[in-house]
């Protein structure tokens, strides 16, 4: 709907409000003035097409009733039909920006690329790892060009780029290893992609004090190897360690499998170098462990997902590396037993407990299929004839990692003996502790005899996400945290929710056929020599609140999905995954936002470690009060008043300051 032209008032010099409700077709309240309107990041050729509701994240001939459609209506209110293109805000001049970046960067011709020069390179940097949010084809890869990839080599070069983008209101998306799960490191439209991969130098590694200073683009696995040489380790370990970068780890405040041992990553941050949305270089903190000289501002940038500033340099305090790792895998009788095994591990192993992970039988079956298809070394440690999903409680991986390997092995063997014999010693004499120890029962267990076998057992857990996303199957991933006693109710409620909406799970025979399908996808991927992903990426459903019943016409004779779960038992993080043979929008429409509302009511978090990104920003009011969200918006305005940094991420659209870049 386009409204009739309205008289245009003369611009007045005043502070731009940064929080106001979007104008919808049914309400003319809080109308933006023309000089306060959001800048378009689209070419003129694509302007009308985009605001007709054809953005890659939306489908249909007309805008849907979502935050996005509110934006479309708002633009129509601001630029009524007949007012002329001259009244629209100017599209950023990406050609001029690219030319400036080439001058600002040393060897800029090598490290600045436009979509006109190399559309496939820009497409790769604009595609998220799970391919849930496809690149915006309407602008970044059109003949007119648009998006620019910049790879600065220093903090000063990052500052030069952001200073220019701030001056010209050009939106920017910072990008590390691009291994995220919530679409937080890829463009929503055609933002400048600021890759930090060249900031990969280790500036200092102090063997005496255990302090590391390095660039934000250093790969986690490589940093850990460098630390190991001096007897230290990184306080973070996760499956994407071979690709993810430490700057991205801090920006998303990644969790990982060592959380139960080391705690949160932010506890090890001594200092950061950050470039904010104004282009200012902020050096926050120092390498000293004790520095009590004012508010700890550096912590604002940990977990902010690049919306406040770009982390360019990191100084971390390092924990000592263990001298050995003793690993066991236990087959739990039921999920209650799995949780009790975790509690018993904490009580029995104490300070040497390095990790406590869990995965269900379906995840185990997928991993075994993946390793068979790709020629990996992992095999079923319980024997070739053992059924992966024969144990209702799934599998618990326990690691003991201390300074005396022989002592750790003795403790772990004693723990396993008690679990298998049903004679675990309670943590204390209370009735609750005695009952918990009684429930810690495993049907079977295997103990690694050397580091090679320990690595093989770890492979079974670390390959869980890869085995799903690396096949021809589509995967809808939900990263939540809950009290352990609510893990099983959450899984059961999700299964029931899907069943009530006509979505049926496969039986054992059907699931085996799905694994065979997955093997074909894995084998083809290995032959291509690329990371395997779903051939047809799924488009996310737009969350709505409150949730409403969803009905879909489904064929009851065919299974539509399988629920596959794993998680970090030691810190209450559940990864609930719904797998389908092909993209099926009925699944996210059924579960979103219902599952997140369920988690919020249970006192959990809608994002345990993956972050918010563009996946959950509109769901933030479920777990954050309006007052807290207002303060978050105030903080963003301090560091990024024009809203150019990672627009469309973290905060709900109406809470974002500036509104000048791309707040979808």
Image (spheres, grey):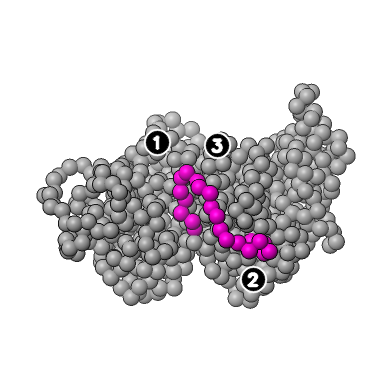
Residue named by callout 1: 626
Residue 489's spot in the image, x, y percent? 66, 41
Residue 432 image-quadrant placement: top right
Whichever of labels 3 and 1 marks the residue nearer the N terminus, that label is: 3
In the picture of the structure, the residue carrying the numbered disc 2 is 521
Q: What is the chief secondary structure element of the magenta stretch?
A: loop
**Residue toward you, 515 or 552:** 552
Count of marks, rendered view? 3
- Residue at 62% from the left image edge and 51% from the top image edge: 500
User: Of 616 and 197, which appears nearest the observer?
Assistant: 616
Of badges 3 and 2, the one in the foreground is 3
Place residue 639 in its image quadrant. Answer: top left
3 and 1 marks in contact (CB < 8 Å):
no
Q: Which residue is mark 3?
A: 601
Judged left or right of residue 159, residue 521 is right
Region in magenta = 540-560
- Sequence order check, earlier mark of 3 and 2: 2
Give the spatial CA distance, label 3 vs label 2: 39 Å
Residue 113, above or below 540: below
Does residue 240 lie above or below 30 as drawn?
below
Q: Which residue sits at x=76%, y=46%?
A: 393
């Amino acid at each position: 709907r386009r409204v009739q032209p309205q008289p245009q008032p003369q611009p007045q010099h005043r502070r731009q409000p940064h929080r106001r409700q979007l104008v919808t077709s049914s309400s003319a309240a809080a109308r933006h003035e023309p000089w306060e309107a959001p800048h378009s990041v689209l070419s003129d050729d694509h302007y009308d097409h985009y605001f007709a509701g054809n953005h890659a994240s939306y489908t249909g001939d007309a805008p849907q009733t979502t935050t996005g459609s509110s934006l479309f209506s708002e633009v129509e209110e601001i630029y009524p039909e007949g007012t002329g293109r001259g009244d629209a805000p100017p599209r950023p001049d990406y050609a001029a920006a690219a030319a400036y970046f080439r001058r600002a960067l040393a060897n800029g011709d090598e490290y600045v690329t436009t979509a006109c020069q190399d559309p496939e390179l820009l497409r790769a940097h604009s595609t998220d790892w799970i391919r849930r949010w496809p690149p915006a084809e309407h602008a970044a890869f059109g003949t007119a060009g648009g998006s620019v990839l910049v790879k600065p080599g220093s903090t000063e070069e990052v500052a030069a780029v952001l200073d220019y983008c701030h001056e010209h209101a050009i939106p920017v998306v910072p990008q590390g290893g691009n291994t995220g799960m919530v679409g937080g490191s890829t463009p929503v439209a055609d933002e400048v992609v600021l890759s930090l991969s060249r900031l990969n130098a280790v500036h200092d590694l102090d063997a005496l004090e255990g302090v590391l200073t390095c660039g934000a683009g250093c790969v986690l696995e490589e940093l850990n190897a460098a630390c190991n040489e001096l007897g230290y380790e990184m306080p973070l370990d996760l499956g994407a360690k071979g690709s993810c970068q430490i700057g991205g780890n801090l920006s998303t405040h990644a969790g990982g499998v060592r959380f139960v041992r080391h705690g949160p990553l932010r506890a090890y941050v001594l200092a950061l170098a950050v470039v904010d949305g104004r282009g200012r270089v902020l050096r926050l903190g120092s390498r000293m462990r004790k520095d009590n000289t004012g508010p700890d501002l550096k912590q604002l940038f940990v977990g902010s997902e690049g919306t406040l500033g770009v982390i360019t340099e990191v100084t971390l305090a390092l924990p000592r590396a263990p001298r050995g790792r003793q690993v066991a895998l236990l087959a739990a009788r039921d999920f209650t037993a799995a949780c009790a095994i975790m509690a018993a591990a904490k009580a029995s192993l104490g300070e040497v407990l390095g990790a406590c992970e869990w995965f269900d039988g379906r995840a185990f079956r997928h991993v075994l299929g993946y390793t068979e298809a790709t020629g990996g070394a992992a095999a079923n440690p319980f024997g070739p004839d053992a059924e992966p999903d024969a144990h209702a409680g799934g599998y618990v991986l326990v690691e003991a990692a201390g300074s005396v390997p022989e002592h750790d092995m003795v403790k772990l063997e004693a723990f396993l003996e008690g679990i298998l014999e049903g004679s675990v010693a309670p943590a204390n004499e209370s009735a609750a502790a005695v009952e918990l120890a009684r429930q810690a029962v495993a049907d079977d267990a295997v103990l690694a005899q050397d580091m090679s076998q320990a690595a093989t057992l770890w492979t079974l857990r670390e390959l869980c996400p890869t085995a799903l996303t690396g096949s021809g199957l589509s995967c809808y991933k939900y990263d939540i945290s809950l009290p352990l006693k609510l893990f099983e109710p959450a899984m059961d409620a999700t299964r029931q929710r899907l069943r009530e909406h006509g979505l049926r799970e496969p039986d054992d025979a059907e699931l085996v056929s799905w694994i065979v399908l997955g093997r074909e996808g894995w084998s083809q991927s290995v032959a291509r020599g690329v990371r395997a992903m779903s051939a047809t990426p799924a488009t996310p459903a737009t969350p709505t609140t409150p949730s409403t019943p969803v009905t879909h016409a489904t064929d009851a004779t065919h299974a539509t999905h399988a629920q596959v779960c794993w998680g970090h038992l030691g810190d209450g993080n559940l990864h609930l995954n719904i797998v389908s043979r092909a993209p099926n929008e009925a699944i996210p429409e059924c579960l979103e936002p219902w599952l997140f509302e369920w988690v919020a009511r249970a006192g959990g978090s809608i994002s345990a470690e993956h972050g918010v990104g563009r996946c959950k920003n509109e769901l933030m009011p479920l777990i954050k009060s309006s007052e807290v969200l207002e303060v978050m918006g105030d903080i963003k305005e301090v560091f990024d008043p024009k809203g150019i940094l990672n627009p469309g991420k973290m905060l709900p659209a109406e809470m974002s300051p500036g509104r000048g870049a791309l707040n979808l």
